[in-house]
Image: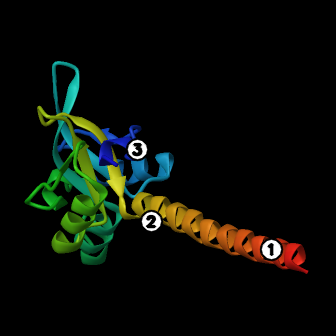
Amino acid sequence: MAIGEICRRDVVVAARDITVRNAAQLMRERHVGCVVLAEERDGRSRPCGIVTDRDVVVAVTALGLDADVIRAGDVAAKELLEIHEGAGIAETVAVMRTKGVRRLPVVDQDGYLVGIVTADDILELLAGELTGIASMVSREQRRESSERRAGAARRA
């Protein structure tokens, strides 16, 4: 399954020069843990950074800096990590694991933002798949038991 099939398409996006306070307010209003920083080109967004709730706490609040002055682009990671919408789940998990991130902007072949995927999204998907497998195993055990009882009754 391609990551583009499970990513969230409703992404909170802002310009790099938004203040940290305004980015935090967006996160609160939209109930998300990050804002994707992007440049607008031809009505489309090209990601250029990401600021997370953790960035706000660790890089601004904990240091007593003024969130009305500091720009989100100043606290965003220097290296923007993103994943192509055609990437598989295993590839996405590998990037998240090796880079130590929980969120990745998802881009199309031209590098434009199409969504965002989080570790929580992947956990939810995998939990559903595992539940399905567990249900299948349970159903198979009940079917085999029923068939054995029916066979024993026919032989008796």
Q: Is residue 59 left or right of residue 144?
A: left
Question: Which mark lies nearer to you, 3 or 1?
Answer: 1
- Give the CA separation, mark 2 to mark 1: 42 Å
Where residue 151 is drawn, which disc sits there? 1
In the rendered image of this protein, does residue 24 appear above or below residue 86?
below
Quadrant of the drawing holding the C terminus: bottom right
Q: How crowded is mark 2: few (under 14 residues within 10 Å), some or many (20 or more)?
A: few
Q: SS of the residue at dot 2? A: helix
Q: Is residue 38 left or right of residue 120?
A: left
| Residue under label 3 | 8
Q: Of the two numbered discs 3 and 2 on the same chain, state the one appearing first in sequence.
A: 3
Under mark 2, the amino acid is Leu
In the rendered image of this protein, does residue 112 appear above or below residue 132?
above
| Residue under label 2 | 123
The answer to the question of whether label 2 and label 1 lie on touching residues, with beta carbons closer than 8 A, is no
Q: Residue 91: which quarter of the image?
A: bottom left
